[in-house]
Image (tube, grey):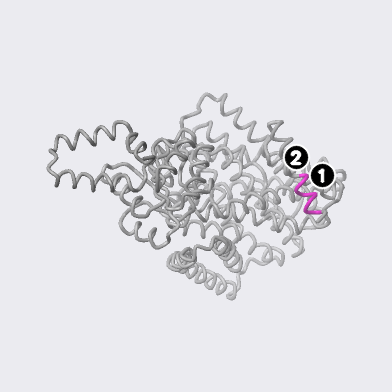
């Protein structure tokens, strides 16, 4: 309990302080980790265990990134991933290996692992900064993401190479080849199962209307895919990313995003704090010249090489600078790779400690490097309006419809016939499936939740139509819209005039009771049957409509 309270207190205090100073939350988490870790008050006994738990934050982060990317878009990015990303890993890895070999004087095998281990950047730091600044859809953000994606793939052969280099043999055994084939078969099986079995499972759980079961199912999917991929040699983060891509076109994606988001925030914060805890002041004091010199050299070499490669990939100078400085740090996979190399006897202990310190310091320097890169990019005079059209964003300025029952579907059909984009949200799994089969853009989710509204694009909505049956849920949604999106007009369907008056007092632009339109239609039929002329009927209804049914509001009191 003391550890938990210490972590929470340090995190809240440090993040508030560093945000107020304009240094960002990541540096705040790192500072909090230093304070509660062995270098500070030693309030946490096992920083290594905390780091392993915190790595689940990276898993959830990759899942949420994947769920925003449709498979078609991932296929389009293949040249960026394998071209730009592959070139970065190979060239940076070889360059750093050469620097290490000739400056430190280690063997070729040792310098190879060190060089390629430091060539991998931090997925957690890079993607978190891109997400915080809403830069994932820019050209340089997409290129940076492609590079990080390839680096995650590169972890697998690097982990395989460690024991091979340790025994001094480059011969891959037949059993290893068989293991690769088995892993490939499992990978394909996971993709097939994910493609055809996940949605039916989610539909069955959604039908139960049990929100706790749905949250549990979402966590099971993320962690299940991560665990399976880890068993075949890929990273857990890569498995979670694949799970996200498989769910990118699912009608349940927005609700799943909303359910997973809190876990990502908490665990990713814990990961950053655990990085701060691993800072070893003894190693810093003993080898401070090597550590600080190595950190600066690595940051400069990686930034320069990534900028050069980005320019060769036809990014503008400003974009190349932003990408290079963002990804100049070493990554979390370096902890795993160097620890494995130490266990295999490939790297001596007196070399591992400085390397881990270099990784931590480079991560801590990331926010500063990003600021420097942005400042240089802004002064370069080559900044472009480079926001890329995001294939994953829904139609620009859609009408949001909360509730896809009889009324909601009618509204959606009218909008569709008028070529006005609309997105509907409903908690009825069968209704959502039926609506999607008929070509409507409808998703499963609780429209009254702020995070779900944000996921479906409430920020860009032209207006919100509330057709929910439950007046309490509808009122909660209206209050949320009024608080978070006051510029989005809200139109509501209600059961009676009392509810209409209450909703309009909350800021609803227009609210119509169910009984009004049906009563007017019936009245029109009766007037026609009673012999009232068409002109008189039209004049009567225009009079009612012009005053927003004010006369009918007055009639309700008599």
**What is the magenta range?**
3-10
Q: Which residue is mark 2?
A: 14
Q: Residue at x 75, y 45 (%)?
A: 358
Circle nearer the viewer, 1 or 2? 2
Left or right: 454 with respect to 553? right
Above or below: residue 478 compared with residue 539: below
Q: Which residue is mark 1?
A: 35
**Where does residue 545 sit, x and y in percent of width and height?**
29, 35
Answer whether residue 353 is magenta in the image: no
Q: Secondary structure at mark 1?
A: helix
Above or below: residue 379 compared with residue 206: above
Left or right: 16 with respect to 383? right
Cα distance in 3D space between marks 1 and 2: 10 Å
Above or below: residue 32 compared with residue 435: above
Q: In what quadrant of the picture does the N terminus appear?
A: bottom right
| Mark 2, other Cα within 10 Å: few <14 / some 14–19 / many ≥20 | many
Above or below: residue 407 compared with residue 480: below
Camera-side residue of 41 and 417? 417
Locate residue 27: give its quadrant: top right
**Where does residue 360 sit, x and y in percent of width and height?**
74, 46
The answer, for residue 264, to whether it is visible in the render is: yes
């Amino acid at each position: 309990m003391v550890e938990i309270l210490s972590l929470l207190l340090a995190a809240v205090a440090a993040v508030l302080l560093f945000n107020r100073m304009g240094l960002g939350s990541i540096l705040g988490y790192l500072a909090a980790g230093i304070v509660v870790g062995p270098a500070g008050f030693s309030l946490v006994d096992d920083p290594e265990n905390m780091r392993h738990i915190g790595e689940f934050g990276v898993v959830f982060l990759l899942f949420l990134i994947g769920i925003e990317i449709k498979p078609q878009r991932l296929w389009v990015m293949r040249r960026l991933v394998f071209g730009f990303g592959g070139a970065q890993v190979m060239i940076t890895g070889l360059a750093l290996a050469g620097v290490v070999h000739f400056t430190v004087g280690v063997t070729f095998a040792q310098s190879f692992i060190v060089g390629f281990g430091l060539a991998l950047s931090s997925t957690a730091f890079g993607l978190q900064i891109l997400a915080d600044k809403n830069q994932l859809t820019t050209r340089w953000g997409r290129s940076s993401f492609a590079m990080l994606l390839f680096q995650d793939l590169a972890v697998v052969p690097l982990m395989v190479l460690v024991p091979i280099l340790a025994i001094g043999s480059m011969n891959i055994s037949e059993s290893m080849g068989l293991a690769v084939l088995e892993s490939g078969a499992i990978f394909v099986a996971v993709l097939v199962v994910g493609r055809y079995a996940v949605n039916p499972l989610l539909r069955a759980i959604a039908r139960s209307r049990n929100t706790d079961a749905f949250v549990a199912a979402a966590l099971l999917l993320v962690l299940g895919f991560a665990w399976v991929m880890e068993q075949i040699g890929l990273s857990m983060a890569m498995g979670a990313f694949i799970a996200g891509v498989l769910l990118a076109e699912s009608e349940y994606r927005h609700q799943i995003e909303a359910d997973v988001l809190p876990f990502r925030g908490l665990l990713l914060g814990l990961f950053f704090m655990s990085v701060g805890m691993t800072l070893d002041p003894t190693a810093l004091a003993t080898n401070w010249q090597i550590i600080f010199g190595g950190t600066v050299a690595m940051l400069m070499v990686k930034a320069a090489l990534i900028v050069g490669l980005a320019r060769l990939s036809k990014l503008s100078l400003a974009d190349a600078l932003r990408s290079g400085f963002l990804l100049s740090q070493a990554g979390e996979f370096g902890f795993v790779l160097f620890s494995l190399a130490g266990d295999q006897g490939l790297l001596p202990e007196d070399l591992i400690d400085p390397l881990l310190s270099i990784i931590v310091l480079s991560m801590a320097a990331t926010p500063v490097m990003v600021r420097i890169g942005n400042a240089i990019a802004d002064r370069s005079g080559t900044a472009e309006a480079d926001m890329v059209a995001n294939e994953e964003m829904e139609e620009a300025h859609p009408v949001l419809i909360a509730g896809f029952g009889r009324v909601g579907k009618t509204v959606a059909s009218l909008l569709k016939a008028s070529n006005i984009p609309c997105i509907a949200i409903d908690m009825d799994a069968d209704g959502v499936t039926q609506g999607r089969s008929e070509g409507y853009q409808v998703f499963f989710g609780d429209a009254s939740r702020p995070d779900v509204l944000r996921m479906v694009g409430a920020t860009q909505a032209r207006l919100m139509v509330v057709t929910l049956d439950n007046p309490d849920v509808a009122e909660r949604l209206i209050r949320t819209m009024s608080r978070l999106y006051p510029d989005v007009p809200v139109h509501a369907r209600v059961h009676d005039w009392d509810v209409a008056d209450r909703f309009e007092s909350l800021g609803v632009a227009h609210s119509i009771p169910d009984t009004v339109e049906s009563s007017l239609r019936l009245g029109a039929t009766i007037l026609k049957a009673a012999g009232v002329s068409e002109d008189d009927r039209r004049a009567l209804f225009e009079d009612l409509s012009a005053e927003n049914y004010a006369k009918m509001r007055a009639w309700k009191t008599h």
